[in-house]
Image (cartoon, helix red, strand yellow):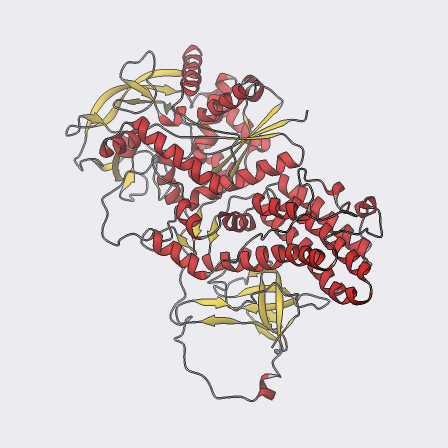
């Protein structure tokens, strides 16, 4: 058996609902695990709800329920929402479990035995009004590093600095607002600052476990001097009590990551596999997928503790960016802080999976969800390009050719050879196979946006072949030629279903049922073997998204503009909100003039002198030293790409433009802007508030004339 891969996503906090920001991570990890398994690499997807901490205790008290009841309620809700989005965990557990308690207690005893868990008396913030020591999330004040106000007691959401809660300036209790006093308390510390830990972490980082930018970031923490880590909290605290320290509890950030291992233990027991074969064996590769907000915990404390107690180290920690919506930080007042359940009530969740996949890369950049772009991409690609191809060819065969495939004029094995470029049927089959092989590597590298582009290439081959061959015309004089055309296109659809499955599994499975073929493996060597058999029964695969649906999502998600009482957020959610990229600056009034009335009429002859063409953007990059200009390389169906400079860089990012269609004035005289020649103009509309590119609704071939 090949090496097993164990993939984890960060644990959602069982104190609130799953929202679209969370799904950036869980959908990505799900696609990765699905792809690995279909490519022949055994992979598990393990997760759990993070069920401990003071916020849960306080929220449960407010609602008049036990912390366990609150956690169980959110655990069931989370499982339901994940299922809606086809996020299929191998095991989805809870950190408040007997397995996790046993694992954490054993880890603690090992650290004690090795002298790596030591007691120290420290100053703590004690609220005399509430008669309790205040954990990190229950104290706020001014950051001691950058002087930003309203920061929590462990990390500044503005400058990223970490510090002790007692370092805060002008601290206040978030429960009652009073100023706490300083009081002594004895706590347990993990000796992270020990020389051997720093040496180990340097070597681990140099092993390639992190993306280069993240590795450089973590090195600055190490070189700046590691500090010992407090792994205990004073009661009252909802968590595991420390066996030999009455009144003390394990800090949630100690027991939460071990939830990965506890969830593994549950899976292992159900499948008669030893836990050690997963976490203490060279036969397992551990890969974490996390957001930028929890890098500190997963790249310093976590690997150091794992190393100390003899568990497998993460081979990879894949860090992704945060979600913005319509170019801005998620906002409850604007209705762009959207819960997963709300989105699913109005739009098929597979649409979000497809859209996210089109944005995912292996780097740690942020991801923007533009509802306008979502509609354009899903309708233009998933519906018009993919679903429409399945529909056209399946229904043509069903209605005109007894629903039966013919043969192809080449053996399937011939399609495995290199393309010759002669544009024959066999050559186009080889191009499909080459794209599919590239997708296999791209899936392994988690370059999902490039997978989506290759899928578009394959769909274009099928659509263009059918359009050029015109089986509806062939049918009149040579029905078997029409059957041959459709058989080729059905084989292209088979490839699409096979390689779409990790991204949108239900869509792909519906397509495969309609084709009557298997997609249980993702293997290019299986392509172009679908011949001489009946098709299945075609199923409607996907409906278009209407703007009314996304408007309804925003309206349903809006909250009152009235001031809200401060809400104590869970650790991950609070940090994630702070880590979201700053919103792009809106166009100035000068950039967004007020719309004016119609200009003087022109004749049809005058209008016909303007050559409007559909263009496919292949490359995009900002023009140096310009805030507004973007250099585009556009396919207009010509031998070479056309370079066009457009004033859209303040509205669109390059990755939003690549592989999208635009309308181009193709016969405009060349002009030079900021030293860059522009041979055309892309059309955009401006309503006085926002600039929007004019785009064709259908995925028309590059160079199509706009009339």
Closer to us: 634 or 326 = 326
Question: Total of numbered circles in the picture?
Answer: 0
Residue 101 point in image, percent of width and height: 40, 18
Q: Can residue 460 be seen in this view?
A: no
Q: Nearer the viewer, residue 223 or 487?
A: 487
Q: In this view, does 666 lie above or below 355?
A: below
Name the residue: 54% across, 35% down. 210
The x, y position of residue 559, in whole percent, is: 29, 52
Task: From the viewer's perspective, tell me whether residue 209 is left or right of residue 463.
Answer: left
Q: Which residue is located at x 23 percent, y 53 percent? A: 562
Judge whether 685 appears above or below 361 on screen: below
Quarter of the picture containing the C terminus is bottom right
- The residue depicted at 14 percent of the width and 30 percent of the height is 129
- Counting from the top left corner in percent of width and height, residue 270 is at 53, 21
Is there any visible trace of residue 453 in the rendered image?
yes
Q: Nearer the viewer, residue 18 or 666?
A: 18
14 sits left or right of 454 in the view = left
Quarter holding the N terminus is top right
| Vertical side of 665 occupied by 392: above or below | above
In this rendering, position of residue 497 left or right of residue 423 = left
Relative to 235, say whether 79 is above or below. below
In which quarter of the view is residue 613 placed?
A: bottom right
Given residues 135 and 520, the one toward you in this image is 520
Q: Residue at 66% across / 69% down in the picture?
A: 703
- Locate residue 262, reporting x and y percent: 46, 22
């Amino acid at each position: 058996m090949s090496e097993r891969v164990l993939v984890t996503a960060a644990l959602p906090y069982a104190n609130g609902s799953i929202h679209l920001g969370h799904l950036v991570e869980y959908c990505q990890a799900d696609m990765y695990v699905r792809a690995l398994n279909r490519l022949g690499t055994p992979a598990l997807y393990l997760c759990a709800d993070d069920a401990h901490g003071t916020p849960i205790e306080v929220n449960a008290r407010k609602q008049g329920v036990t912390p366990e009841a609150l956690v169980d309620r959110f655990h069931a809700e989370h499982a339901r929402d994940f299922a809606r989005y086809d996020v299929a965990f191998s095991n989805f557990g809870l950190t408040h479990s007997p397995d996790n308690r046993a694992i954490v207690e054993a880890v603690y005893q090992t650290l004690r035995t090795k002298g790596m868990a030591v007691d120290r008396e420290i100053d703590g913030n004690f609220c005399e009004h509430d008669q309790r020591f205040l954990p990190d999330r229950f104290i706020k004040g001014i950051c001691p590093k950058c002087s930003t106000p309203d920061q929590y007691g462990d990390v500044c959401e503005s400058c990223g600095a970490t510090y002790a809660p007692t370092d805060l300036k002008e601290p206040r209790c978030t429960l009652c607002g009073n100023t706490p006093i300083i009081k002594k308390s004895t706590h347990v510390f993990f000796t992270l600052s020990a020389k051997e830990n720093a040496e180990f972490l340097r070597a681990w980082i140099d092993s390639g476990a992190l993306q280069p930018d993240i590795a450089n970031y973590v090195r600055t923490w190490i070189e700046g001097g590691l500090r010992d880590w407090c792994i205990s909290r004073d009661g009252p605290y909802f968590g595991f009590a420390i066996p030999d320290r009455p009144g003390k509890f394990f800090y949630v950030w100690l027991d939460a990551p071990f939830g990965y291992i506890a969830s593994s233990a549950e899976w292992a027991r159900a499948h008669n596999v030893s836990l050690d074969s997963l976490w203490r064996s060279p036969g397992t590769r551990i890969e974490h997928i996390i957001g930028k907000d929890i890098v500190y915990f997963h790249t310093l404390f976590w690997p150091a503790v794992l190393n100390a107690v003899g568990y497998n180290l993460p081979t990879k920690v894949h860090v992704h960016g945060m979600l913005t919506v319509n170019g801005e930080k998620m906002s409850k007042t604007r209705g762009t802080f959207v819960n997963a359940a709300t989105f699913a009530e109005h739009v098929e969740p597979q649409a979000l999976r497809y859209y996210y996949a089109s944005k995912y890369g292996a780097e740690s950049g942020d991801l923007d969800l533009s509802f306008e772009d979502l509609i354009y991409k899903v309708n233009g690609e998933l519906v018009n390009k993919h679903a429409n191809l399945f529909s056209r060819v399946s229904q043509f065969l069903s209605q005109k050719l007894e629903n039966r495939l013919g043969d192809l004029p080449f053996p399937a094995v011939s399609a495995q050879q290199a393309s010759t470029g002669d544009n024959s049927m066999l050559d186009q089959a080889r191009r499909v196979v080459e794209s599919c092989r590239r997708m296999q590597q791209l899936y392994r590298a988690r370059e999902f946006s490039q997978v989506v582009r290759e899928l578009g290439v394959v769909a274009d081959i099928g659509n263009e072949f059918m359009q050029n061959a015109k089986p509806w015309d062939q049918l009149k004089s040579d029905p078997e030629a029409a059957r041959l055309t459709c058989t080729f296109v059905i084989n292209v659809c088979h490839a699409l279903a096979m390689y779409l499955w990790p991204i949108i599994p239900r869509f792909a499975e519906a397509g495969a049922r309609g084709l009557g073929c298997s997609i249980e493996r993702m293997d290019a060597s299986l392509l172009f073997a679908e011949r001489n058999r009946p098709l299945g029964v075609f199923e409607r695969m996907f409906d278009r998204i209407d703007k009314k649906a996304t408007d309804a999502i925003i309206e349903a998600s809006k909250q009152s503009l009235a001031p809200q009482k401060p809400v104590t957020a869970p650790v991950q959610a609070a940090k994630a909100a702070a880590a979201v990229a700053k919103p792009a600056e809106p166009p100035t009034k000068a950039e967004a003039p007020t719309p004016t009335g119609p200009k003087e009429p022109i004749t049809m002859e005058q209008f016909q002198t303007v050559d409007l063409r559909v263009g496919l953007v292949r490359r995009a990059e900002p023009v140096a030293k310009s805030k507004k200009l973007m250099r585009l390389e556009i396919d207009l169906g010509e031998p070479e790409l056309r370079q066009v400079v457009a004033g859209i860089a303040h509205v669109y990012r390059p990755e939003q433009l690549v592989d999208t269609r635009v309308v181009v004035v193709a016969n405009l005289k060349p002009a030079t802007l900021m030293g860059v020649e522009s041979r055309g103009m892309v059309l955009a509309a401006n309503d006085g508030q926002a600039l929007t590119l004019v785009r064709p609704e259908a995925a028309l071939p590059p160079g199509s004339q706009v009339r």
